Image (cartoon, coloured by chain):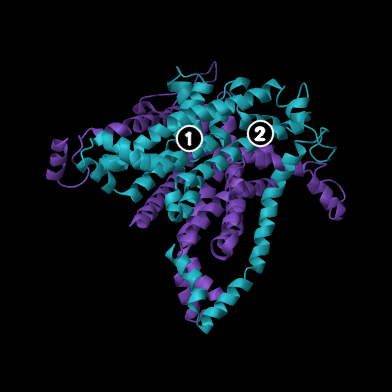
Chain colours: A cyan, B purple
Amino acid sequence: MTAGTVTRAAPEAGLSRAGRLSQIRRVRRPSVLRGFVWLYLLWSLAPVALAILFSFNSGSSVTEWQGFSLRWYVGDPYYSVLHDPALHAAVIQTLRLAVLTTAAAVPIGVLFAIGVHRWRSRQASAWTFLMLLAFVMPELIFGVGIFLLFTNLLTIVRLGTTAQFLALVAWNISWPAIIVRARLQSIGDEYEEAARDLGASSVGAIRRVLLPMLFPAVFASVVLVFAGVIDDFVIVDLLSSNAQSQPMSVIIYTLGAHGGSAAAPALNALATVMFIMSIVTVAAGWAVYRLLTRGERHRAEGLSLSAFTGV
Amino acid sequence: MTRTAEAGRRQAGPGTRQPRWLWPTLAVPGAGWLTVLFLLPFYVVLAVAGGTVNPLFLNAVPIWNPLDWQSGYVRQVFSDLFGASAFLGPSVLRTLLYDALASTACLLIAYPVAYFVARQAGRRKGLYLVAVVAPFWVSYMMRMLAWQNLLQGNGLVNHALTVAHLITQPVNWLSGMPVTVILGLVYGYVPYVIVVLYAGLDRIDGSLLEAARDLGLGRTRTFLHVTLPLSRQVIYAGALITALPMAGDFYTNTMLSGVPTTNMIGNVISSSLSTPGQGGEGAVLVLFLLIVMLAPMIWYVRSTSRAESGDVL
């Protein structure tokens, strides 16, 4: 961060010749790179843009434009997202799982992060390690494990929404835990100490001082978990029991994988609904996050990307 | 009130003045959830892998006592992998090949993009960043669906190639074409690599690069001798973040090919769960995958937590 300021301040400070030369070079240089980046952007965004475009097609093709319509969203009495019971149920199932999982995983993860951060023992680092392992575990391995758990040991939990919820929470605890842990490390202990020196109880210090300071991080994890559940596929696919418990990603997969169904643009429409849900979540989340961290904009620049991508 | 404060002052060090039980208690729900729903499943996988099969209903019969574990499934998978009728061998080789090619392509695409955004984008950095990271937020399934649209028999790709006179007949891209699967994998995973690489490249101290330049290194040599070595760690991390999940990917393959000739190990595992009598083999294969991946996963956890604590200090 300091480095950035130094380079930016340099032109005003009057540069040496070599410095000015490198300044000129820096302006000239990116052309090839920039072209590459633009090609990449085209390649990465155009297919999605076309998929969205063809969800508004009035015909049933996803390759030939026949005019604008909302047929595949609301108009068509059989195949539109609104009227096809499978697509309709999928939207509701995705929303239900996203809300439930976020409501459970975020508080659990936040408390977990605070707990292991202050606990300071070998056990605490073992738990942290377990949490991080859950974070990097390939989803298929976790998914198969939890599928076998629910079908062989905890058979009391039937496959379906309950199983999906339990598994998604386990899978998503790591997000809030990692983000809040990073935030706790940067906050340090001083504020809480001060609160207690001024007479707050330990719980009071957490509630009155620590939690408000953690709020941006908590909020970022709400956004991440919510958007992550919308996008999730492997776990919900393995644990869905019938059409009612198949969220949007699973419907797109099952209908999409077996070749063009009659309602191909309806599938595009469903994907677009999903797209809008994630983008709205992230964009609103980003805006609120920036508002919350207004006082520390300088830090927030770097922090918000990492907070919103989890890296 | 004063009593608490006094007590606080008397004791030494942070973290000692609260009741001992407080912090562990906060961690209990998370720890419990992870134990039952993350750790316990691995034991179930072991029990199923070491178990037998119900000859009538063909469902897996797990054996819970480790001392009684059978080796039937393990031997069966072993012969499927390396034996005379090794029908799993090609899937494993294909997984390795596709994974290696796609991860390499991801790095080759992601590095210049991340480098540009982190180092060269100038005032529009924020804008580029948003554009580059945008696919990260588009659902994976949607992105695969988008390519399915484009690669159809009468899709835009065939259309464009016909117009350009590169092909005369429409190519059947969506059935058994390794190149399509690899493209799908690259397309699906490259945003993750960009984010990881960007975070690492953005962290490199710009004054080091200035110094290299001032000391007379050219652009290429500055890159080769300063930037590249400094980003080595993050390149490994970027490679891992694609290579690990790709090895367990089955949906990209199903969406963009869907025939056994491009099957990867993930397809074998996921179909074993729905095929009666194959649950045990699926469990063994999952263990196999886990064993292969455990070391890189632990390396990744270690290196990221080290980087984190380095940042704080």
Output the chain of dot 2: A
Residue B273 occupies quadrant: top right
- Could you tell me if the residues under marks 2 and 1 are in contact, i.e. CB atoms within 8 Å? no
Q: Is residue B116 visible?
A: no
- Which residue does the numbered mark 2 point to in the structure image? A273
Q: Mark 2 vs mark 1: same chain?
A: yes
B2 to B191, vertically: above or below: above
Query: Between marks 2 and 1, how big is the CA–CA gap?
Result: 28 Å
Residue named by callout 1: A142
- Provide the chain ID for the residue under circle 1: A
Apparent side of residue B40 relative to residue B85 in the rendered image (left or right): left
Q: Percent position (x, y) of residue A89?
A: 63, 22
Give, as a three-letter code, the residue at label 1.
Phe
Q: Is residue A107 left or right of residue A84?
A: left
Judged from the image, the secondary structure of the residue bearing numbered disc 2 is helix
Q: Which of B99 and A214 is in front in this view?
A: A214
Sequence-first tag of 2 and 1: 1
Residue B30 x/y as whole percent: 37, 32
B74 and B190: which is toward the camera: B190
User: Which image quarter: residue A179?
Assistant: top left
Specify the quadrant that holds the N terminus of chain A: bottom left
CA neighbours of label 2 inside 10 A, class few (<14), some (14 to 19), many (20+): some
- Does residue A183 appear anywhere in the picture? yes
Q: Is residue B202 above or below residue A77?
A: below
Mark 1 residue element: helix
* Up-down relation of residue A63 to residue B274 (above or below): below
